[in-house]
Image (spheres, rainbow, N blue to C red):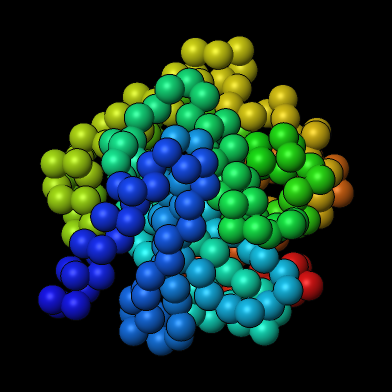
Amino acid sequence: MAAVVGCRGVLRLRLLSSLLKPSVHVPWAGPAAAFGTTVSSGKVAVNGVHLHYQQTGEGEHPVLLLPGMLGSGETDFAPQLKSLSKKLFTVVAWDPRGYGHSRPPDRDFPLDFFERDAKDAVDLMKALRFKKVSLLGWSDGGITALIAAARYPSYIHKLVIWGANAYVTEEDERLYQGIRDVSKWSEKARKPLEALYGYDYFAKTCEKWVDGIQQFKHLPDGNICRHLLPLVQCPTLIVHGEKDPLVPRFHADFIHKQVKGSRLHLMSEGKHNLHLRFADEFNKLAEDFLQ
């Protein structure tokens, strides 16, 4: 424990000394034991914040994993960091600003927060010197990935998304209100986020997220990124769990229809966290598509 604290203390000093530099890469040893493989961690100064990431693999194909609401690499993608091919891919999992270890700042939700995340994600991978990348985006991360693919088409190679939506309906609004109070979440869903954030930050940020996502309901057609979908040029795989309680099937169908040449794969028993619950099946699906 002392070694870990000492390492992070040194990290903080190194970060403070580099605040005026536009892009600083500060690696340190990551929690390899948690994944059963070598995982390095670091922070990079990007767009005025220090973004935390984890990285594993030596493959020529860089892949960025984009987490969902309140998510981070360690809470959202352990099976992918552990099991996606290390020979084929270099896998990076990031914590968006205000989430995970990309704090400070605290997370906020201006109307352009998805656009901001998309720019942060692309600029992070450029700072890590990746020339072209593929994106695997879950839930909010799927929305971010769609925006990134539309805004930076020459930089995105392939796209896999699941649990994402391009607009907000009244039905969605009711579903969001259902998760606003984290004390009503199942212990299994609540525990890792409570451990990561502490209860107060976790609870307050979830409430802020509900308010943030509901902003789109007041825009024409509830638009988040539906206007950008025709601009996505890269090969795209949309995965949908037929038992997803948070994102109804019509969202996956809409994205499939609007993204030219996209593929839709349905998992009959899949829920919102299908990449965790059916990790082996999901990982094989993603690997086959990315090759």
Residue sitting at x 37%, y 65% = 74
* Residue 166 horizontal/vertical position (percent): 61, 33
Depth check: 155 or 7 in front? 7
Residue sitting at x 49%, y 13% = 218
The quadrant holding residue 87 is bottom right
4 to 51, vertically: above or below: below
Depth check: 266 or 141 in front? 141
* Residue 126 horizontal/vertical position (percent): 64, 51
Depth check: 114 or 288 in front? 114
* Residue 176 horizontal/vertical position (percent): 37, 34
Q: Is residue 250 visible?
A: no
Q: Is residue 18 left or right of residue 291?
A: left
Residue sitting at x 37%, y 75% = 29
Depth check: 44 or 233 in front? 44
Q: Is residue 131 left or right of residue 83?
A: right
Q: Is residue 11 left or right of residue 158?
A: left
Residue sitting at x 65%, y 37% = 147
Farthest right residue in view? 261
85 to 159, vertically: above or below: below
208 to 49, vertically: above or below: above
Q: Quadrant of the N terminus?
A: bottom left
